[in-house]
Every structure is written in structure tokens, then in C-alpha cells.
Image (cartoon, helix red, strand yellow):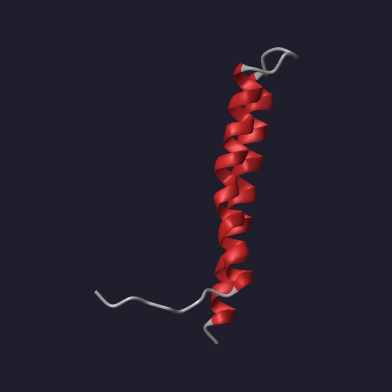
Amino acid sequence: MKRNNHKMNPEILSLLYDVYGTGNDIEILIWRMLDDPAGPMTEDEIVNMLQGIIELHKSRCRKLQLGLNHENQ
């Protein structure tokens, strides 16, 4: 098998890691829902956090796509 020695642009790599941050956002939501000493979240709070996570993820993916497009020009 041929090995690809191409190094990834550090900016693109950083953007890629940002996209993986969505998993951390979900872990924080789970902590808030199950383990926060302040008590359980309301349904509205849960939905608001989920909507925020969704929008952050979309924005991270968009920024990554723009970075990749710029890289390939």
C-alpha cells in the first residue's frame, strides 16, 4: 500500500478538530441533564441547548467547507 506523506494544512486541521467539538458539546448537555447539582433541566432548556449545538455544528462544518474550498483553489 502506498503511503501518503502529504501534510495537512494546520488551519484545516484546526477546523477539522473544531467539528469534532460537537461531541464535547453533547457530553456537556448530558452532564447538565443528568449530573448537574442545580437539578434537572426543563424541556425548553434541553431543546434550546440542542438547537444551539445543531447551529454550532452547522457553522463549524460550513467554516471547514470554506477552508477546504480555499485550500483547493
Q: Is 40 situated left or right of 64 in this image?
A: right
Residue at the far left in the pictured view? 1
Q: How many marks?
A: 0
Residue 39 in percent (x, y) is at 71, 12
Query: Which quadrant holds residue 26?
Result: top right
Note whether 65 is above or below 17 in the view shown.
Answer: below
Residue at 62% in and 21% down: 33
Residue at the far right in the pictured view? 38
Note whether 29 is above or below 8 in the view shown.
Answer: above
Note whether 52 is above or below 61 in the view shown.
Answer: above
Out of 4 and 68, give the one closest to the viewer: 4
Residue at 61% in and 63% down: 15
Residue at the far bottom in the pictured view? 73
Residue 50 in percent (x, y) is at 60, 35
Residue 17 in percent (x, y) is at 58, 56
Residue at 67% in and 18% down: 41
Query: Which quadrant holds residue 31?
Result: top right
Out of 31 and 8, give the one closest to the viewer: 8
Residue 27 in percent (x, y) is at 58, 33
**Where the N terminus falls, by quadrant?**
bottom left
**Where the C terminus falls, by quadrant?**
bottom right
Query: Which quadrant holds residue 59?
Result: bottom right
